Image (cartoon, rainbow, N blue to C red):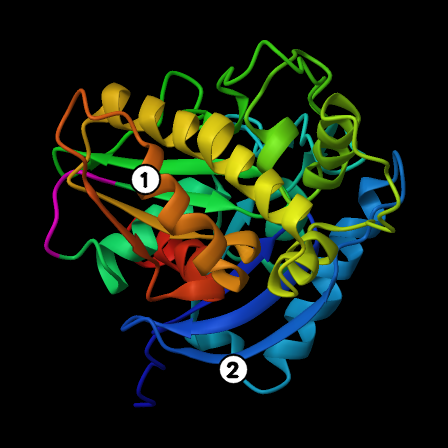
Amino acid sequence: MKKEMKKDLAIAVDLGATNLRVGVVSKNGKILKQFITETPKIKNQPSFLIKTIIVLINSILESYDKKRILGIGVAVPSPIDSKKGEMTSPPNLPYKKVAIVKPLKKYFSLPVFLSNDCSAAVLAEKYFGAGRKSSNFIYLTISSGIGSGIIADNHLLSGHNNSTGEVGHFIVDTIYNLPCQCQKGYGHWEAYCSGNNMPIFLKTWLKSEKIKNNYAVKTSKDIFDLAKNKDKNILNFLKQIGKINDARGVSNIIVAYNPEKIIMGGSVVLNNQAFIIPEIKKNIDKFLSPPKIIISPLKENACLLGAATLVFFK
């Protein structure tokens, strides 16, 4: 009698606002193979996004027997409709909603699990990272957008429609009153400190400080490059970022959830720790005892590994 092949692998999809990553992950959290491409952003054409995910998964399956795959986990940068298996109103992607579960399940005939990216990432920290010995902690990402995943008393907080953790939409400012890309409010944390919006805030700040805007800044990387070259105006701007926004947002997290530690990730943080972490620690409110603030040991793999946990630890 032929021995049945063991199902011991998960397909993980990290659908980011900037990059789309698809990998195959073992149950001990090892990424065995992955492909990375730019996330498709063709307005009102989510079908092309799904086709791209399918192509990347098929590329993975060229190297691994499908019989070993337990399922597909997908982490997305937006609220989700868990009943319909859709991501809804992603603030940094040009879609109103995207059906994820149904088309992937139909194509691959595998179980498909969907989660907000930060909720997935905090599970990755719980099973594979800095949260393994903690029962109350937060995963916070500052990347194209800003979001969090929350473990409270050893349970994932999900909310009534699986949208807990959208901390990027905390109101942190009423002076500059910048509109958020979500188009549903002003003064949101994401409108100031996210990778997508920091250049917009810089332009507003320079004008308010009556500093001539001669900076050819298009991305947050441009801002940090100037800071690394010790540009005084940019260094002052980053102090403002830390004082008004990063620390205010983090302080809100602390008083709302009382975490033991905050595990930080996302490209803005991972690539610019020296300009961000000290300012947060310097400026956070001390009403409650400050938690440990650390960089994710999983780094850029947190969301991908989190997508795999949806399959292994469902």
In which quadrant of the rendered view does residue 95 lie? Answer: top right
Identified by mark 2, the residue type is Asp
Residue 45: % across, % down: 87, 40
Residue 188: % across, % down: 58, 20
Dot 1 alpha-carbon crowd within 10 angstroms: few under 14, some 14 to 19, many 20 or more: few
Between residues 240 and 92, which one lies in front from this camera angle?
Answer: 240
Query: Compared to 156, does 285 lie above or below?
Result: above
Image point (12%, 31%), residue name = 289
Verify whether residue 134 appears in magenta. yes
Image point (76%, 33%), residue name = 200
Label 2 secondary element: loop
Between residues 311 and 288, which one lies in front from this camera angle?
Answer: 288
In primary-sequence order, the first of circles 2 and 1 is 2
Task: Give the left or right position of residue 166, taking residue 177 as reference.
Answer: left
Between residues 192 and 112, which one lies in front from this camera angle?
Answer: 192
Task: Give the left or right position of residue 287, taking residue 20 as reference.
Answer: left
The kind of secondary structure the magenta stretch mainly shows is loop
Residue marked by disc 2? 65
Residue marked by disc 1? 282
Image point (88%, 34%), residue name = 44
Q: CA distance from mark 2 to mark 1?
A: 51 Å
Read off the magenta span. Answer: 133-137
Label 1 secondary element: helix
Verify whether residue 259 appears in magenta. no
Identified by mark 1, the residue type is Lys
Q: Does residue 121 appear in the picture of this structure?
A: no
Q: How many callouts does the rendering have? A: 2
Image point (59%, 50%), residue name = 105
